[in-house]
């Protein structure tokens, strides 16, 4: 192993680590007065980290392991990291004015986001159970603080507490599963675990070529712990409360970068580490997928808070993405990555629009009923939000339709027609609550609650998201599909 190669593969993490430590010193000296400057340097750092990993996406399935196989800098991790870093940078761009209005602007905020992004990068590059857990906890510890960052807001404190308690429980479940997998395979390395679980090679993990009960329990417990991180049903209970209670820029972050990291980690664990025992976890993924689609759709119908609605939308969309994982083929993994990229854009646009919903006093407007007549008072904002809602519902010709299409196509090609059929039928239910928001904005009586006035950063992100989600987005389908296919191929390289 070459240390120079290892450090080069981890260049993005090195940049984030060094920048975070340097900015920590500036925060200590400059105090909260330096918050905006630190925030923008953090944004540039994240964009620089994304630029560092971008060339790797053309690397295909070549061996890019580092530090004795504990870390992988392959095309899959590069694809996920670009989404993570861009999502975190966009969330930071939307933050300063919001926290300043709340009187909660602190120099520590962008630093927490930087260190969370560092942990997320380790998550998607982990090829060892120890690296997996270090990355996961580095992200989680920062996320717990971010969720409760608005200390004067009871909802934020409650969100942070719930997230911490349930996150600790999920970490315990994950650790228990990891200990069982280690005990029955004799290794922490994903490649060695894959070999040990292969019935053809024998070992304690298999009995006469059949997976042992202990190893099976380990796989199930690990997937259960990861299901919490991606907010899949039945481990979704924290999501609506945390999304509603956390400051909206933090909710934007949670809906994008950590979602990519958790799903990416789940893909690597399932398709690579447990790739020789697909039959052992495939039914679990099918259940998580269908349950998330149905519960997410039904749970959103009765919501009157737009942030809680977006939380259930997140659960619903995770269900659609897990169809690609349940298929367990390169085409399914590629479709999942395409959907994930489009979902990040939809989430950024959706929460940028939510941040622009403010009353005359500058207070956030979160009630869906308060959006009545928005199309007449703020036609541009209403139009962009409607486009995002239609895209989340998967209605053509908007780009959100393409994400659902490629996932269902992968399921049909793999012979899983019933799964695709149920998913398509359930997506009709989901369209209802998205259309409810559009109906309130365009057909309900005007409430006059939402005032005029925009933040430039929010408007820019909303406009860019709307353009990408418009039919113009289909111009990128070939390019995005090729990148996703190259990234997915890395997971099936042994």
Image (cartoon, rainbow, N blue to C red):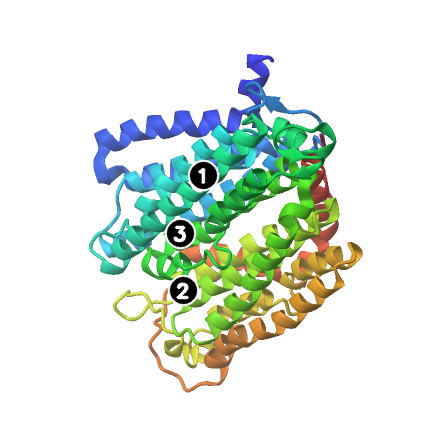
Q: Quadrant of residue 289?
A: bottom right
Q: Residues within 10 Å of mark 1 (few under 14, many from 20)?
A: some
Residue 45 in view = no
Residue 150 in view = yes
Give SS at disc 3: loop
Residue sitting at the far bottom: 445
In the image, what residue occupies the spot 68% across and 24% down?
63
Discs 2, 1 touching: Cβ within 8 Å: no
Q: Is residue 267 above or below residue 97?
A: above
Q: Nearer the viewer, mark 2 or mark 1?
A: 1
Per the image, the residue denoted by label 3 is 94
Q: Residues within 10 Å of mark 2 (few under 14, many from 20)?
A: many
Sequence-wise first label, 2 or 1: 1
Discs 3, 1 touching: Cβ within 8 Å: no
Per the image, the residue denoted by label 2 is 307
Q: CA distance from mark 2 to mark 1?
A: 33 Å
Per the image, the residue denoted by label 1 is 176
In the image, what residue occupies the spot 42% across and 77% down?
377
Give SS at disc 1: helix
Q: Is residue 448 above or below residue 151?
A: below
Residue sitting at the far front: 208
Sequence-wise first label, 3 or 2: 3
Could you tell me which quadrant the N terminus lies in? top right
In the image, what residue occupies the spot 26% across and 52% down?
150
Q: Front-most of 49 and 145?
A: 145
């Amino acid at each position: 192993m070459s240390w120079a190669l290892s450090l080069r593969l981890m260049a993005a993490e090195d940049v984030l680590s060094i920048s975070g430590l340097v900015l920590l010193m500036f925060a200590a000296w400059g105090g909260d007065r330096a918050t905006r400057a630190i925030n923008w340097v953090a944004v540039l750092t994240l964009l620089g980290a994304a630029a560092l990993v971008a060339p790797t996406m053309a690397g295909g399935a070549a061996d890019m392991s580092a530090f004795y196989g504990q870390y992988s800098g392959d095309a899959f991790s590069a694809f996920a990291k670009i989404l993570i870093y861009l999502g975190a940078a966009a969330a930071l761009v939307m933050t300063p004015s919001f926290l300043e209005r709340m009187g909660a602007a602190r120099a520590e905020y962008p630093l927490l986001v930087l260190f969370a992004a560092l942990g997320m990068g380790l998550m998607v590059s982990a090829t060892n159970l120890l690296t997996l857990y270090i990355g996961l906890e580095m992200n989680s510890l920062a996320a717990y603080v971010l969720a409760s960052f608005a200390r004067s807001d009871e909802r934020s404190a409650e969100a942070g507490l719930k997230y911490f308690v349930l996150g600790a429980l999920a970490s315990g479940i994950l650790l228990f599963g990891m200990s069982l997998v280690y005990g029955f395979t004799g290794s922490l390395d994903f490649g060695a675990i894959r070999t040990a679980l292969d019935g053809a090679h024998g070992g304690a993990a298999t009995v006469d070529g059949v997976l042992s009960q202990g190893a099976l329990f380990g796989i199930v417990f690990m997937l259960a712990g990861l299901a919490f991180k991606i907010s899949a049903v039945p481990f979704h209970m924290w999501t609506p409360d945390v999304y509603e209670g956390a400051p909206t820029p933090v909710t934007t972050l949670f809906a994008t970068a950590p979602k990519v990291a958790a799903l990416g980690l789940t893909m690597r664990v399932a398709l690579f580490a447990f790739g020789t025992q697909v039959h052992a976890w495939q039914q679990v993924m099918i259940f998580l997928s269908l349950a998330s689609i149905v519960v997410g759709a039904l749970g959103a119908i009765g919501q009157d808070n737009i942030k809680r609605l977006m939380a259930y939308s997140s659960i619903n969309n995770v269900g659609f993405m897990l169809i690609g994982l349940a298929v367990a083929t390169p085409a399914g993994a590629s479709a999942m990555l395409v959907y994930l990229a489009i979902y990040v854009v939809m989430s950024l646009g959706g929460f940028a629009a939510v941040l622009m919903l403010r009353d005359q006093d500058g207070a956030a407007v979160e009630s869906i009923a308060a959006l009545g007549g928005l199309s007449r008072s703020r036609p541009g904002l209403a139009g962009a939000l409607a486009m995002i809602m239609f895209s989340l519902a998967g209605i053509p010709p908007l780009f959100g339709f393409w994400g659902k299409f490629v996932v269902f196509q992968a399921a049909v090609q793999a012979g899983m027609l019933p799964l695709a059929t149920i998913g398509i039928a359930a997506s009709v239910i989901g369209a209802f609550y998205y259309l409810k928001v559009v109906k309130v904005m365009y057909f309900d009586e005007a409430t006059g609650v939402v005032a005029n006035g925009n933040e430039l950063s929010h408007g820019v992100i909303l406009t860019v998201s709307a353009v990408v989600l418009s039919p113009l987005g289909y111009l990128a389908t070939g390019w995005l599909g090729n990148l996703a296919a190259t990234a997915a191929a890395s997971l099936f390289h042994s």
